[in-house]
């Protein structure tokens, strides 16, 4: 039986799905309710985002374990450059003081997203804020790719890792979203815990060959993710063996053979993070199931021009 | 006394205004309620758009006098290429059948806006739809740059031209927006009629030197606008003499001397349509009052990086 959320991320002959990466990072502040609302307003019904726990165990939506100085401002409206507190050291009431509405254009990360809207008063959302948003009747067809971030300081603290998974799964169940959520991570150990704690919720495996460099301004995943460079050619099999429903390779890693193998063994393939027209075209040529992008308009445009749909 | 809407378009030492061109044409379908809502959601409170009358004299928001084949689809979901009906020949109930949610990427116009979101079911709005949107209490600080398009087939039909002006002004008054609207046009004759029919509503003069070419896919303004190439250097004076409150030059035409002269004689200067970072920077260097743009995020970004505000 296919899980409904896996079906929602799966393409067909005339459909390639679009997944809004951190909302629509190219257009609006990443991992913000404003960004998620935008994505939903333009007919995209699949959202990717990142979850980290605060000191008081509130799952919040943010990418890095430390507040990202080039896009987070304190109550004084200044960017945090050089003094980035760790999320796990802050209580939710402290998190609420920060503003994520602007990017610092003097930083390399800021320069990666020159089209992003600049606003004041945008808050780091709680996971429950997003759950509340998509629980509205008009958003019943929305499905989530919930990325669990694993704290590099806690890689060998098994109890803490179990706890992160438990807190998030509990919230998913209480919101009634266990059939609309994928648990998604670079950390295969964390995904194994998800599978044990919630066998009914499908898991989604992020991969990246070490031969492709990390992107500027991102927490590296190399500490927590398996080294797959030696197993190139059989990564889909490894994902399948680990109980995965989705395989989410970095778009530069994937080949025609990978896609064919994934299809043979019933894996859904969602590539990340595809932002340039040439790369979008290459992914359409490979006929992946889903394209994760910071620029949903660009992917809509190429799919539309080439006669593909992304919903329905 | 300064009209409140003119003050809303005027900058100061630390403020340069951002005007969303046709909403935010670079991001969402132009002249759509969806685009206007987006602009308002990102903290932009000045909107530029275009008004044309249907056969049954309903003012609608669209740029060209003929439905633009590369971005308008019929009920069969196909672009209108080659069979573009004239707006003035269609009744409102016919206009409502068309969909403006997508751009045809095979056309030169479509290729100008590769980031634009692609949607289905987006309708050509009535002017009254926009008035209703901005009449919500949360949008009380929103001001409008309402561009009157003058039908090239009616340039010598004075009664028809009076009628266009009368219908639009009547709607502005009925919506209670005569202190939040600028009447804006390339057609100085039409603006003179506005001034006579509604002396209390400020008028805004678009100009473009003929030496700069028309943009791809746009109705040309050359039929209805005065030839100003011979009067370069004293255009602000001509606008002032014609009763203008705003001067809106094409951004490639403007000089430091023009800005200084406009300031001396109390004209507000809003340049159009500025989309590239180098050009945005040049307009900030000139310290214009307002920048009309298809990409509000890009202008926000440069203003933010350079320490300017755009609202408040």
Image (tube, coloured by chain):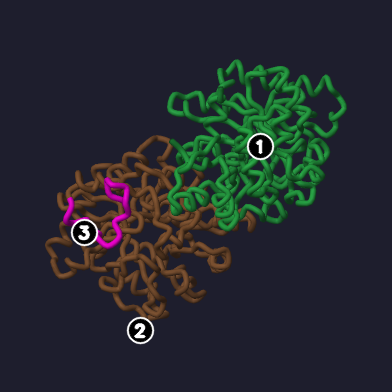
Chain colours: A green, B brown
Q: Which residue occupies 40% across, 54% down?
A: B103
**Which of marks 3 and 2 precedes in the sequence?**
3
Q: Which residue occupies 74% across, 38% down?
A: A64
**Chain name for mark 1:** A
Q: Secondary structure at mark 2?
A: helix
Residue for badge 2: B230
Q: Secondary structure at mark 1?
A: strand
Q: In the image, A86: left or right of A274?
A: right
Residue A106 seen in the current view: yes
* Mark 3 vs mark 1, CA separation in Å: 51 Å
Q: Which residues are magenta?
A: B73-90
Dot 1 alpha-carbon crowd within 10 angstroms: few under 14, some 14 to 19, many 20 or more: many
- Magenta span has A280? no
**Chain name for mark 3:** B
Q: Secondary structure at mark 3?
A: loop
**Chain name for mark 2:** B
Comparing labels 2 and 3, the label whose residue is closer to the camera = 3
Q: In the image, A169: left or right of B212?
A: right
Task: Give the quadrant of residue A66.
Answer: top right
Residue for badge 1: A247
What residue occupies the far right of the structure in this picture? A156
Q: Quadrant of the image for the N terminus of chain A?
A: top right
Where residue A236 appears, as percent x and y from the top left, is: 69, 38
Q: Is residue A194 above or below residue B243?
A: above
Where residue A82 appears, as percent x and y from the top left, is: 80, 46
Q: Quadrant of the image for the C terminus of chain A?
A: top left
Comparing labels 2 and 1, the label whose residue is closer to the camera = 1
Nearer the observer, B294 or A266: A266
Task: Give the quadrant of residue B217.
Answer: bottom left
Residue for badge 3: B86
């Amino acid at each position: 039986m296919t899980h409904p959320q896996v079906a929602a991320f799966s393409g067909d002959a005339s459909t390639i799905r679009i997944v809004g990466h951190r909302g629509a990072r190219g257009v609006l502040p990443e991992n913000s309710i404003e960004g998620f609302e935008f994505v939903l307003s333009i007919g995209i019904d699949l959202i990717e985002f990142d979850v980290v726990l605060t000191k008081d165990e509130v799952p919040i939506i943010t990418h890095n374990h430390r507040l990202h100085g080039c896009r987070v401002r304190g109550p004084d409206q200044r960017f945090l450059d050089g003094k980035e507190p760790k999320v796990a050291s802050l209580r939710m009431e402290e998190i609420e003081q920060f503003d994520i509405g602007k990017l610092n254009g003097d930083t390399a990360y800021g320069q990666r997203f020159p089209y992003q809207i600049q606003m004041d008063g945008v808050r780091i959302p709680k996971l429950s804020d997003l759950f509340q948003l998509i629980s509205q009747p008009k958003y019943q067809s929305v499905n989530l790719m919930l990325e669990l971030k694993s704290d590099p300081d806690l890689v060998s603290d098994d109890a803490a890792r179990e706890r992160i998974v438990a807190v998030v799964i509990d919230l998913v169940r209480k919101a009634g979203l266990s059939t609309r959520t994928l648990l998604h991570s670079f950390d295969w150990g964390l995904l194994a815990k998800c599978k044990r704690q919630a066998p009914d919720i499908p898991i989604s495996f992020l991969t990246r060959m070490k031969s492709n460099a990390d992107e500027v301004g991102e927490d590296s995943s190399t500490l927590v993710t398996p080294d797959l460079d030696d197993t190139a050619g059989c990564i889909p099999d490894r994902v399948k063996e680990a109980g995965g429903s989705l395989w989410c390779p970095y778009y530069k890693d994937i080949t025609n053979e990978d896609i064919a193998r994934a299809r043979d063994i019933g894996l859904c393939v969602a590539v990340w993070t595809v932002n340039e027209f040439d790369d979008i075209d290459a992914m359409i040529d490979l006929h992946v199931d889903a394209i994760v992008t910071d620029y949903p308009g660009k992917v809509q445009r190429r799919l539309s021009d080439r006669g593909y749909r992304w919903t329905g």
